[in-house]
Image (spheres, grey):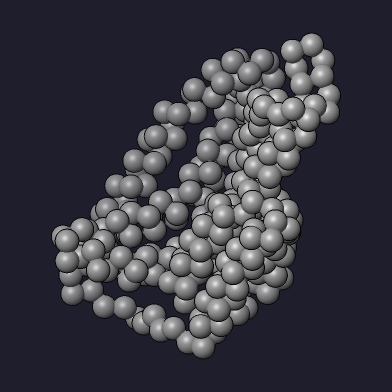
Amino acid sequence: MLKDITLGQYFPGDTPVHRLDPRTKLLLTVVYIAALFMVSTWGGYALCIAALGAVMAVSRIRPRALLKGLKPLVFIIVFTAVLNLFFTAGDDVLFRWGAVKITYTGLERAVSMVLRVLLLVSGTFLLTYTTSPLAITDGLERLLSPLKKLRVPVYELSLMMCIALRFIPLLIEETDRIMSAQKARGADLETGTLPERARALLPLLIPLFVSSFRRADELALAMECRCYNGGEGRTRMKQLRMTGRDAVAFCLGGLLVAGILVLRRLGI
């Protein structure tokens, strides 16, 4: 299950999506998320699915990689569907068994919420799949640069996010290594009831915390040895520049929002 967590991973490529400016991809991700919350018709969901599929095709991200990243969220998705299915009031009853009933309104709400969660998570994954953590940091810093006038530590916040994204795969790999070592010593982590399995995972926390603090200390020492002093006076080897492809991407994002609004207005 740990190997299925792909958040923070970057798949290098030379596709038009990979070559987009990170600021463009960050802004379009925000637009995509806002568009998802504006969707209220099945036509709008179909349009979002088509847009997501087009980005996957252009960026050459395989559906298998996206589905693999969604596996750890199965419980949350099922829980969301059950809550909306059985606890949504409505007069159009489809099934009744004692006090339990399923209405058409509840079924429609459950399907729409599951679609919204899947599309939301998939769009966020595509951002990290096609953009390196360093590029995300640079793009976020440039977008938040006006806040520097308010004495907001923009660079430090961006650096923290970059380090967090880089540490996610490392911590997952470290956890998997510790679990394998515990199993080799006879620990039973896969059998028993859910509370028993949860208690069996507690011995993993101490070595995981020790390893995490050791990595953080090594990173801090490496930054200090390289005379790191924050974002003041810092230069970049690669300057961010928006090109014509970024303008095209913004236009396509605007068309997506316009299409959703039109379908919402028409009730399609």
In x, y percent, where is residue 252? 59, 76
For the point 80% across and 26% down, which residue is it?
A: 93
Q: At 43% from the left edge and 72% from the top edge, which residue is drawn?
A: 23
Residue placed at 78% from the left, 30% from the top? 92
136 vs 150, nearest the viewer: 150
Q: Residue at x 51, y 57 (%)?
A: 34
Image side of residue 172 versus residue 85, left or right: left
50 lies left or right of 222: right
Question: In the picture shown, does residue 52 fall above or below 66?
Answer: below
Q: Residue furthest top?
A: 98
* Depicted 133 relative to depicted 14: above or below: above
* Residue 226 seen anywhere in this rendered image of the structure: no
Relative image position of residue 46 (x, y in whole percent) = 73, 59
Residue 103 screen position, x and y as percent: 76, 29
Toward which corner of the image does residue 150 lie, by quadrant?
bottom left
Q: Which quadrant of the view contains residue 51? A: bottom right
Q: Quadrant of residue 249?
A: bottom right
- Image quarter of the N terminus: top right
- The percent coordinates of residue 174 (x first, y second) are 51, 42
The one of 175 and 17 positioned closer to us in this rendering = 17
Can residue 106 be seen in the rendering of this structure? yes
Q: Using the image as rendered, state which of residue 268 and residue 7 is in the foreground.
A: 268
Left or right: where 72 falls relative to 138:
right
Name the residue nearer the viewer: 68 or 146. Answer: 146
Please, which residue is most extreme toward the bottom here? Answer: 244
Quadrant of the image containing the C terminus: bottom right
Q: How many marks?
A: 0
